[in-house]
Image (cartoon, rainbow, N blue to C red):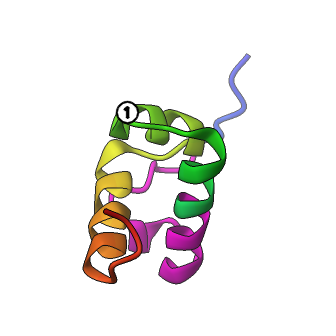
């Protein structure tokens, strides 16, 4: 039975997530340290976002010297 409801489109960029970029960055850093994640694919899976968004947030953290 189809109700005709379409799922939301998955965000492609961090700006498309609908959450402040600073909050996304802070959540990413917190998740990295608490869960000891190493790869972008691991982080993306845990955060339920695409690897592209994770990469964008990691680059932002690196530019701000918050992540090595």
Given residues 15 and 67, the one toward you in this image is: 67
Q: Position of residue 5 (x, y in %)?
A: 65, 40
Q: Is residue 67 above or below residue 45?
A: below
Secondary structure state at the residue bearing disc 1: helix
Q: Residue at x 72, y 32 (%)?
A: 3
Q: Is residue 33 above or below residue 29?
A: above
Query: For residue 42, what is the image quadrant?
Result: top left
- What span is in magenta? 8-28
- Residue placed under numbered mark 1 in the picture: 41
Q: Position of residue 4 (x, y in %)?
A: 64, 36
Given residues 22 and 16, the one toward you in this image is: 22
Q: Is residue 16 left or right of residue 4?
A: left
Q: Residue at x 74, y 16 (%)?
A: 1
Q: Is residue 59 visible?
A: yes
Q: Position of residue 18 (x, y in %)?
A: 56, 72
Given residues 13 and 23, the one toward you in this image is: 23
Residue situated furthest top in the rendering: 1
Label 1 crowd (10 A; few <14 / some 14-19 / many >=20): some
Q: Is residue 22 magenta?
A: yes
Q: Residue at x 33, y 83 (%)?
A: 64
Q: Is residue 52 above or below residue 15?
A: above
Q: Position of residue 19 (x, y in %)?
A: 58, 74
Q: Is residue 48 left or right of residue 57?
A: right
């Amino acid at each position: 039975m189809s109700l005709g409801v379409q799922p939301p489109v998955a965000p492609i960029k961090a700006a498309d997530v609908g959450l402040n970029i600073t909050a996304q960055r802070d959540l990413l850093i917190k998740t990295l340290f608490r869960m000891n994640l190493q790869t972008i694919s691991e982080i993306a899976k845990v955060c339920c976002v695409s690897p592209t968004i994770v990469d964008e947030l990691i680059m932002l953290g690196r530019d701000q010297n918050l992540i090595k």
